[in-house]
Image: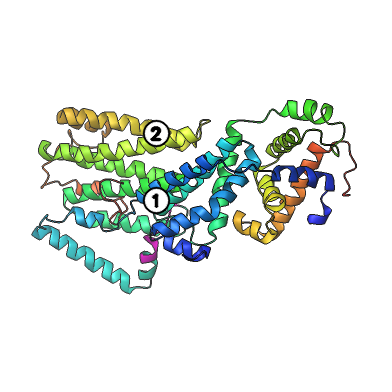
Amino acid sequence: MSSNPEKLLQQARTFDQEALARIYDLYSDALYAYAYKHVGTAQVAEDLMAETFRRFLTALEHGGGPQDHLRAYLYRITHNLITDLYRREPPPAQELDEDRLVEDSPGPSSILDEKQGSERVRQALRLITPDQRQVLTLKYLEGWSSTEIAQTMGKSLGSVKALQHRGVAALQRILLEGEDPSPG
Amino acid sequence: MNNHEINPKLKKMLESLQDVPIRDLQASHTGREDYMAQVKSLNPRRSASRKSARQGKPLGRRAWVTRFAAITAVIVVALSSLGGTIYAAQAAQPDDLLYGVKTLTEEIQVTLESDPEEKLDLYISFANRRLQEIQAQMAAGEEVSDKALALLEKHTQKALEQTAKMESQGMEKALRQIENNLQKQIQIMTEHGKEHPQGGPPGLLKAQEKVQERLELVESGIKDPNIFREKMGKDNPHKQGNGVQDGRGNPDGGQSGTENPGNSPGNGSSGK
């Protein structure tokens, strides 16, 4: 069985079970990891990943789904699900800004507790816009190129770079408040 | 800004999220099994389903004449430069440019149809088609199209009006078909509501209330066709009398047949 995503997608559109299984095997771990990085809970990440594939199958069943760029399509669904989840459970903004970020962190350079540090970053990511969050996570956590991100989001390269710039600035304000904003 | 311009401290903080624990083997295994079960239960939409639903039902002379007229019209159009566009439009989704062409061809189809039962079939089929489009949008995480919702509402109303003109004998069957469609509408909207507990688009919420009202109307009609006719008469004051017509001699076909879209749907009377 080919691992070429475009070929697999073509076969999947004819409901080829082997191709659909291969697609799951190719992307499920990556989508789980992507979801986990946002939500920090294994069970929720599993659920988001499963829901992504369920929606993919439903779309195919109704003659929809992607014509190409399968990976981008799947990530987009997961991202939308994460955004929905965030909307349902708004972050504790006060606690994040005042208590945890300032008092608990004597200096961002010294991350006292790794788990607590990750949680702080997750909370901070929830405070920026969904588009900025998608750009930053795909860029810095998944290692995608700006062109790939632009393709996934259906935006121009310039828009993606602007989102990246604004997202980094916003995160910096939230997480490194009071520090020298210049890089390095 | 590029990768080199991000504050290294911030970059390091972001990278702290890279630490993803290995997936639980059992959960991973179960997840794959569930997915494969979904794959095996896939029920692809078949464009020929409506055709097959009519198999075994001989066409009368009048129906043949109508068919001939429809086919002639289609051929004339196909010969024009619009032919390819119309063909391509049949797969269009609500957000596509060609969606208007698709619904227009549906409208022409229903206008050309003079047989009341066939007309009713078309309305129900179009309602199912709209439902599938809405379902696909929801499944893809897209916003539900107001246009598709409005058309779904229109097809359902037309189907109800057409049913109210039928004799009691055929009415129950028609009402059950509509009931099936309405139940699917409620199921889809409820599922969507669960995924968006803060509320979906206002149009969808309004549509859900209307669907519930209609379902109650249809259920009352299955129990007592006269009540259904009476209620439909009240709901449509512009209609004369109680709207009861003989299924064969309905003179009102033009009125209900002027606004509907339609090409034969994917799934006939039931989605999956």
> Horizontally, is A137 left or right of B27 in the view?
right
Residue B122 in percent (x, y) is at: 25, 50
The image quarter containing residue A21 is bottom left
> Horizontally, is B11 left or right of B140 in the view?
right
Q: Which of B261 and B139 is in front in this view?
A: B139
Visible residue check, residue B231: no
Q: Mark 1 lies on which chain?
A: B
Q: Nearer the viewer, residue B72 or B7?
A: B7
Range of the magenta residues?
B87-94
- Residue type (three-letter) at the residue carrying disc 2: Gln
Callout 1: few (<14), some (14-19), or many (20+) C-alpha neighbours within 10 Å? many
Residue at point 49%, 56% (across, down): A23
The mark nearer the N terminus, 1 or 2, is 1
> Horizontally, is A106 left or right of A32 in the view?
right
Visible residue check, residue A139: yes
Q: Assess whether residue B150 is covered by the magenta stretch.
A: no
Residue A105 in percent (x, y) is at: 83, 31
**Marker disc for residue A44:** none
Residue at point 12%, 54% (across, down): B57
Residue B179 in percent (x, y) is at: 26, 36
Say which residue label 1 marks: B39
**In terms of secondary structure, where does tag 1 sit?**
helix
- Residue type (three-letter) at the residue carrying disc 1: Val
The image quarter containing residue A155 is bottom right
Say which residue label 2 marks: B208
- Please tell me whether the stretch drawn in magenta is mainly helix, strand or loop: loop
Residue at point 73%, 34% (across, down): A115
Q: Which residue lies furthest to the front in this view?
A: B25
Are callouts 1 and 2 both on one chain? yes
**In terms of secondary structure, where does tag 2 sit?**
helix
